[in-house]
Image (cartoon, rainbow, N blue to C red):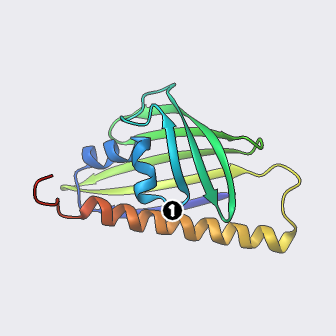
Amino acid sequence: MRVVTTILIQRPVEQVFDFLTTPGNWPLWHPSSLKVTGAADHSLLVGEQVTEEFVVAGQSGTAVWTVRERQAPHYWVIDGVAENGNRASIPYSLREHGGSTTFERVLEFTLLPPAFPGATLVEFARQVEAESSEALRRLKVVLEAEPTPGT
């Protein structure tokens, strides 16, 4: 399964990249991300790992994510393995546009048997696409929000 989402964020590419690649920020914008532990307090480098607790399309679990590639501030790839053996890869691509950033997130994952019956798999895919779109909408809101006085 492959889900591609793109959004324009009114912030510099370096700021967007650092925020996205710091796993402790994921629960702030991604509805599926409940908690991240491990090296979650900084922009991760190649080989670093975190563990994420998630709920995707109603399915809960944990996954270990490892950074496979990093070309700051334009490209970052993580590979994940869930406790049930399902695997995912998520490349982040960022392009600068005069102080703004176009962010593209590609979620590619495999579901191991027993997967879902046909209709259920279609519904699962629709829910994942909706969650991915909502994640980028939230990301834009979080990053474009005016800073609160005193912070």
Horizontal arrangement in the rendering, residue 44 relative to residue 16 (left or right): right
Is residue 17 placed above or below 132 in the rendered structure?
above
Horizontal arrangement in the rendering, residue 135 relative to residue 101 (left or right): right
Residue displayed at 64% across by 60% down:
56
Q: Nearer the viewer, residue 135 or 4?
A: 135
The amino acid sitting under disc 1 is Pro
- Quadrant in the rendering for residue 40: top left
Label 1 Cα neighbours within 10 Å, binned few <14 / some 14-19 / many ≥20: some
Q: Secondary structure at mark 1?
A: loop
Residue displayed at 34% across by 58% down:
102
x then y, percent, for residue 100: 24, 58
Q: Which residue is mark 1?
A: 31
Residue displayed at 74% across by 45% down:
86
- Quadrant in the rendering for residue 59: bottom right
Q: Nearer the viewer, residue 4 or 126?
A: 126
Q: Nearer the viewer, residue 59 or 4?
A: 59
Is residue 45 placed above or below 151 in the rendered structure?
above
Residue displayed at 50% across by 37% down:
37
- Quadrant in the rendering for residue 120: bottom right
Horizontal arrangement in the rendering, residue 118 relative to residue 102 (left or right): right
Q: Nearer the viewer, residue 25 or 98?
A: 25
x then y, percent, for residue 87: 70, 43
